[in-house]
Amino acid sequence: ICSKLWKTETWMLCRLSSVACCPLNRVGANSLWHLQGGLHALSLKPGSKSPLDASKLIGSLSNLPSQQTWGTNLRNCCAHGARPRKMANSKYEYVKDFELDDTLLPNCWIVVRIDGKGFTRFSELHKFEKPNDKRALDLMDACAKEVLNEFPDVRIAFGESDEYSFVLHKSAKLYGRRSSKIVSILVSCFSANYVRQWSNFFGDQPLSSTPMFDGRAILYPDVKTLRDYLTWRQVDTHINNQYNTCFWALVQQAGLSNAEAQATLKGTDTGAKNELLFSRFGINYTHLPEQFKKGSVVIRRHQEFVAKQQEDGTAVIRTRRVPVVMYCDITKEQPFWSENSDLLA
């Protein structure tokens, strides 16, 4: 009986390892606990000749799931996105032990922030307009829309300059919430679309170097912290845009060098920058495009489309949710968040 019990533990360990990747699996952990508890209580070891307490042994074994239960539990795990590990029966299988578990914490909002690598040089090489090139910004927005088209778990995205932040719902199960998988697939989707759609915004201008983006995943525990993150990025957009507008006006219109322009702006506040723009260059900052001042917000909205034409020529109109780009204030409750309360529900 002792030998059979130890074989049973080995059988269970094999099945536990095959479904350990599923966060929904609790049967395996509980069953192993019961089994090991019984073994420790009986002080059994392989080959032990200690007398057995039949009641304790039966009590421990009664808590073990049947093979049918394991099969059902494994199918449930697979239905939620987990996949059992394949046992390759190879002596090289041990190398998998060096892989780190990078599963993101459950019930937390996931933000994947993508940032252009070396885009200062990239923009100079492709002669981007300063301080803002609308073509480049629109291209970034188009790439973000494609990410939302591809991944329903992304609820909202915010972009400025050469960066974009994508917010995945706290219940997202994409790739089992593995950080490396989520970040790499979003970055590759964005980068591929940047190349694919380049000519749609820059026409015949060739893509002279490879655009590259890095990415990282950040977790936020609640909606308030998540909204503070988005507010931070939009406030940063305004600060950077106001400074760059002043800087390039001093360089391009006043003829100052880069160092002289930096020295002129050093220590100036928002009011001083606005006064400099208006008094010296006739630029009213509040009249600049909202896209430049506030960045881009991408969400899904219902949109009508022609599904088909009936025999009498009548169009059948239906609606679907499609990504749209907005240039609006997301730092306040009204009107954006009150009108889009479902985004973070």
Image (cartoon, rainbow, N blue to C red):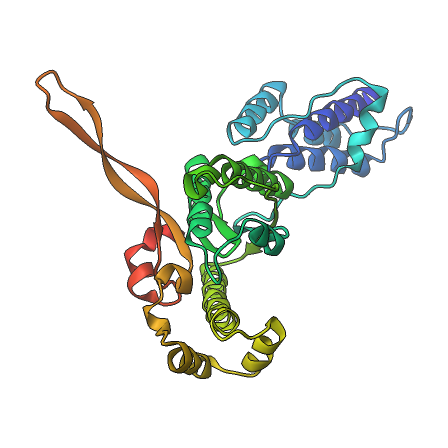
Is 265 on the left-hand or right-hand side of 7? left
| Viewer-side residue, 337 vs 141 | 141
Position of the N terminus, as image quadrant, is top right
Q: Identify the residue at image location x=63%, y=50%.
A: 117
Q: Position of residue 152 (x, y in %)?
A: 43, 38
Q: Which of 58 and 280 lies nearest the eye of the viewer?
A: 280
Q: How many marks?
A: 0
In the image, is 153 to the left or to the right of 23? left
Q: Nearer the viewer, residue 173 or 333?
A: 333
Residue sitting nearer the eye, 143 or 278: 278
What x and y, as percent, mark residue 81?
A: 54, 31
Regarding residue 151, the answer to whether it shows in the image is no
Left or right, 293 with reference to 53 = left
Task: Determine the residue located farthest toward the front in the rendered image.
Answer: 255
x, y (%) of residue 71?
A: 59, 21
Image location of residue 36, percent across then percent down: 76, 35
**Residue drawn at (57%, 27%), measured in percent from left and top?**
73
Relative to 236, say whether 62 is above or below: above
The relative height of residue 165 versus residue 177 in the rendered view (above or below) is below
Q: Quadrant of residue 296?
A: bottom left
Above or below — where is 224 with respect to 207?
below
Report whether 199 appears left or right of 59.
left
**In the image, farthest residue toward the left:** 312
Residue 75 visible, this angle: yes
